[in-house]
Amino acid sequence: GNSVTQMEGPVTLSEEAFLTINCTYTATGYPSLFWYVQYPGEGLQLLLKATKADDKGSNKGFEATYRKETTSFHLEKGSVQVSDSAVYFCALNNQGGKLIFGQGTELSVKP
Amino acid sequence: ETGVTQTPRHLVMGMTNKKSLKCEQHLGHNAMYWYKQSAKKPLELMFVYNFKEQTENNSVPSRFSPECPNSSHLFLHLHTLQPEDSALYLCASSPGLAGAGVTDTQYFGPGTRLTVL
């Protein structure tokens, strides 16, 4: 079946530190992959996406590359800010119209 | 207004009450979704509608009753809920129809925080 596994949080970083949040998936076929972000008290916002192998999604300094050989879609940012504190969700859509989410990773950035 | 809106943002109800959650999308999308987000659990898909027709009911108890009068509006009618139904209920929409061969991006509303006493 389809599934998404994310690294467990919470992740606590100092401002300007490098961020990596690991995400691996299991799927048949060729899913699209997504990162969503949820700020405190809000719904989910699309952060970035990739629709085929070797695609790189990027937005607001965040990047993730679709790696079919390792079935991964790790989220990275070179220098985090306090305003990046949120919960990050990795997800896949495997041509069935349903989003399958990971459990979410909470990021806390300290000044 | 733009995007996906949800009302109310917060709702407290007793187990014998009947209430409804409303979702509206201003994006011209054709599919709409209800998700449940509970603490410490992955988001759970509840219902999917394509062009007002329900195409997915993910084994949701009958105390949750969805309604989609048109492709822009989606309701979730609640009755005789249990305390374990307390959660954030998220609505989403996507441009294409939900189904085989579709990998569309879904756009989410801010959610309704529901507390059942």
Image: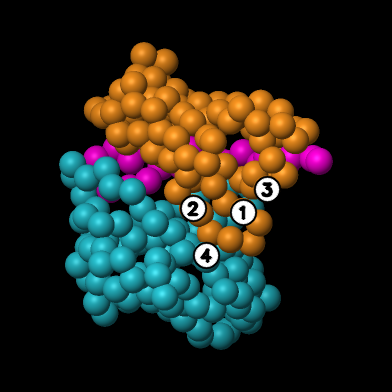
Chain colours: A orange, B cyan
Q: Is residue A97 magenta?
A: yes
Tell me what residue is drawn at x 43 percent, y 40 percent.
A48
Residue A45 is tagged as 2
Nearest to viewer (mark 4 / mark 3): 3
Mark 3 and 2 residues: CB-CB less than 8 Å, in contact? no
B72 vs B96: above or below? below
| Chain of the residue under label 4 | B
A83 vs A79: above or below? below
Camera-nearest residue between B17 and A42: A42
* Residue under numbered circle 1: A39
Q: Where are the magenta residues, as a range?
A: A89-111
Q: Amino acid at mark 2?
A: Gln
| Chain of the residue under label 2 | A
Per the model, the C-alpha gap separating discs 1 and 2 is: 9 Å
| Chain of the residue under label 1 | A
- Pointer 1 or 2: first along the chain: 1
Count neighbours of disc 3 (C-alpha within 10 A) and say few if under 14, some if 14 to 19, many if 20 or more: few
Q: Amino acid at mark 1?
A: Tyr
* Residue under numbered circle 3: A83
* Residue under numbered circle 4: B110
Count neighbours of disc 2 (C-alpha within 10 A) and say few if under 14, some if 14 to 19, many if 20 or more: some
Q: Are marks 4 and 1 on the same chain?
A: no
Rendering coords of residue B58 (x, y %): 36, 55
